[in-house]
Image (spheres, rainbow, N blue to C red):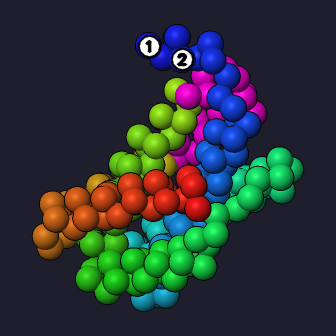
Amino acid sequence: MSAARSRIPPSKRAIDSMIRVDQAGEYGATRIYAGQLAVMGDRSAAAREIAGMAAQEQRHLAYFDRMIAQRGVRPTLLQPFWNAAGFALGAVTAAMGPEAAMACTAAIETEIDKHYAEQRDQLADHDPELSDAIADFQAEEVEHRDRALAAGAEQAHGYPLLFAAIRAGCRLAIAASKRI
Ligand SMILES: [Fe+2]
Ligand SMILES: [Fe+2]
């Protein structure tokens, strides 16, 4: 099925939408980590872990910022919302404790791994520049998920509910930023 799909190149409109949602998501990721670090400071082991992941998110965001400019893609209109919502999600989960902060990353990166896999499937071999970058970032998102799990995400109070709620929020954010 994916082989059949790969023969049909995604439209410019479809690719623009991918760049729009990815730029929004990477921006949101930087805001979540900024919110977490604002609450946690920079001294704990968890904060150092988060600062390392945040630096990788900055690299992902810089790439999509560049793609928005180079390809003339309209950025999401929801940017001011993701600015505040991302920061708030980060601050709230960090205030709940380091395990909850890690649960947030585990939930989001689980969804983003799936999201990037779907985009690569749609792109197939039609836009190697973009799909190579997405593959590169996807590998780092999976690494973030695994680091968050290793750092005790599953020990967060109410983990199953927290994980499910954040994943659902992430799915909504993706659906909204594809279009708006
Ligand atoms: Fe990222
Ligand atoms: Fe990430």
The x and y percentages for residue 111 are 38, 49
Of residues 159 and 16, the one nearer the viewer is 16
Mainly helix, strand or loop, the magenta region?
helix
Q: Locate residue 97: give its quadrant.
A: bottom left
Q: Which residues are magenta?
A: 122-140
Residue 17: x and y in percent read: 63, 47
Mark 1 → mark 2, Cα distance in angstroms: 6 Å
Which corner quadrant holds the C terminus?
A: bottom right
Residue 19 or residue 39, whichever sits in front? 19
Residue 79 on image: x %, y %: 61, 72
165, above or below 64, in the image: below
| Camera sees residue 151 | no
Mark 1 and 2 residues: CB-CB less than 8 Å, in contact? yes
Residue at label 2?
5
Residue at point 54% right, 68% down? 28
At label 1, the amino acid type is: Met
Number of labels in the image equals 2
Secondary element under disc 1, as helix, strand or loop, is loop
Q: In the rendering, at what x and y percent does residue 88 appear?
A: 43, 83
